[in-house]
Structures are given as structure tokens and as C-alpha cells.
Image: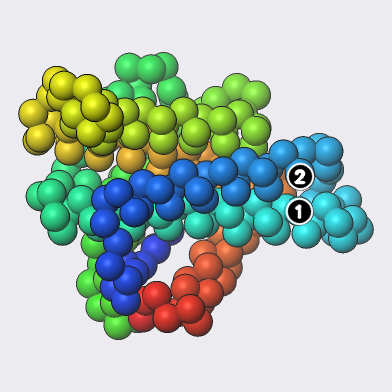
Amino acid sequence: MVEAIYLPKLNNLTPTLDSTLLKAMEEAGELARAVLKFMPWEKLSPEELANQPLASGLLADVKEELLDVAQTCVTMIFVMEDYFVIDADSLIGEHLAKLLDKGYAYDNNQSYRITTIQNRHGGNYKYISLPHLQIADVTLLTTVCKIQEELGELTQFLGKHAGASGEQNCLAADEVNKGAALELLDVAQCCFTMIYILAERYAVNIPELVEGHVNKLRRKGYCQ
């Protein structure tokens, strides 16, 4: 069972809200491309995939791009906390209530959080634990489409509702920021849905996957 993941603050970079939003759109597009390429093999079992080098490589691309999307979400959460006085963890209750209102079932006995862990490996990390939603017939494709939908709604808050798209803004700045943060949690929730799919259907070792992702960021000099 996937309980939580830890993703770092990229404290050797200087992301802004706009730059991170653009990065999120870029990474989501790359994830969509990776999922589409893997689709012909999506019904294979882990044992069958092990004997299909091409399919295994395409699944590896999906895993890598998914972590890049999740990392961009975490980066945007840090940006919103640092510059827009948003506390993501305080919005978890509202996020969970919204899931229930939409008819999503999950384990209410679990504790769900998005909180900062300081001085982990010498830097700040987000501890993220989000529900395993019980969604009938969920697939990698439906999930990546949902990520695109949620990013569109996030962009609407930061664009249309903030008056940045040439339209008159209809929400106050604090409402825009809170709405954007909640949409960002929806994107993160979709990432967790895909993480659960990878773990359950393709026997992906999620802690190992996250560790490899963080090591890649360290090699690039983005974080501790």
C-alpha cells in the first residue's frame, strides 16, 4: 500500500507561480504522450511486461513523467506558501469534503496530509498523503485526462478569475489563491491515483521510484 511520498523543495532554483504553471502544463503533456505510447501494452501483467523490453521502457517513461508532474505540483505548493500565504495542509479537509461531495469513496480511517518536513537530507520536503479513491474502470488514460482537466481549472483561477486573461477579475486575490491551491490539490490527487494504478497493476515499487526521482534532481543540482 502507498501511504505517502516525500518530494523536495527545489531550493537551488527560483521558480515563480507563472513559471511553475508553464512547467506543469509541459510535464502534463509529456505524461500524456508517455501514457498514449504505453497504451497498446496496458493490459499486460507485470510478468508479461518483464519479457517485453519495449513495453517496459515505455512504462518507465510513464513513471518518470508522472513524478515530474507531481514534483511540479509540490514546487507550486512551496511557491504559494512562500509568496501567497497559502497553507496547503489546512486545505486538506476541504479537499476531502469535495471528494465526498463528488461521490468518490476512500478510506476515512487514514490520515491525509501535505506538510513540510524540514532538514530531510539537508533540505525541505513535502510529505504528501492523499486518498486511494475507489473509481470504477480507472485507467492511466482516464487519469492523465483528468490531470489535464484539473490543470485547466487551475489555469482558469490564475488567469480568468485573476483578470490575467484580459477579462475583468471576478474574485478577490485571496479567493483566487485559495481556489488555485484547491485545484492544485486536485492535480496532486490525480497523481496519487496514477501512483496507485502503477503500484497495484504493474507492481511498481513507489518508494524506489521516488528515490530515483529525487536522486535525479540532486544530480542536476536542483536540491539537497
194 versus 179 height, above or below: below
Image x and y of residue 161, in percent = 21, 26
Task: Tell me if mark 1 has few (under 14), some (14-19) or many (20+) residues whose alpha carbon lies within 10 angstroms of its own.
Answer: some
Point out the tag, 2 or 1, that comes first from the N-terminus: 2
- 178 lies left or right of 101: left
Name the amino acid type tagged 2. Phe
Asked if marks 2 and 1 touch (Cβ < 8 Å), the reply is yes
- Which residue sits at x=49%, y=35%? 147
Q: Is mark 1 on a helix, strand or loop?
A: helix
Residue to which mark 2 is pinned: 38
In front of the other: 125 or 217: 217
Please tell me whether mark 2 sits on a helix, a strand or a loop.
Answer: helix
- Residue 15 image-quadrant placement: bottom left
Find residue 93 and report its horizontal and vertical position in percent.
Answer: 22, 34
Q: Is residue 190 above or below residue 123?
A: above
Q: Is residue 166 shown to the viewer in this render?
A: yes
Is 81 or 204 nearer to us in this picture? 81
How packed is label 2: few (under 14 Cα within 10 Å), some, or many (20 or more)?
A: many
Mark drawn on residue 194: none
The amino acid at mark 1 is Leu
Q: Name the residue under label 1.
A: 58
* Residues at marks 2 and 1, CA–CA distance in whole angstroms: 5 Å
Taking the spot 52% from the left edge, 56% from the top edge, the residue there is 67
Where residue 186 sits: x, y (%)? Answer: 37, 35
Q: In this view, does 3 lie to the left or right of 185?
A: right
Residue at (40, 48) in percent of width and height = 22
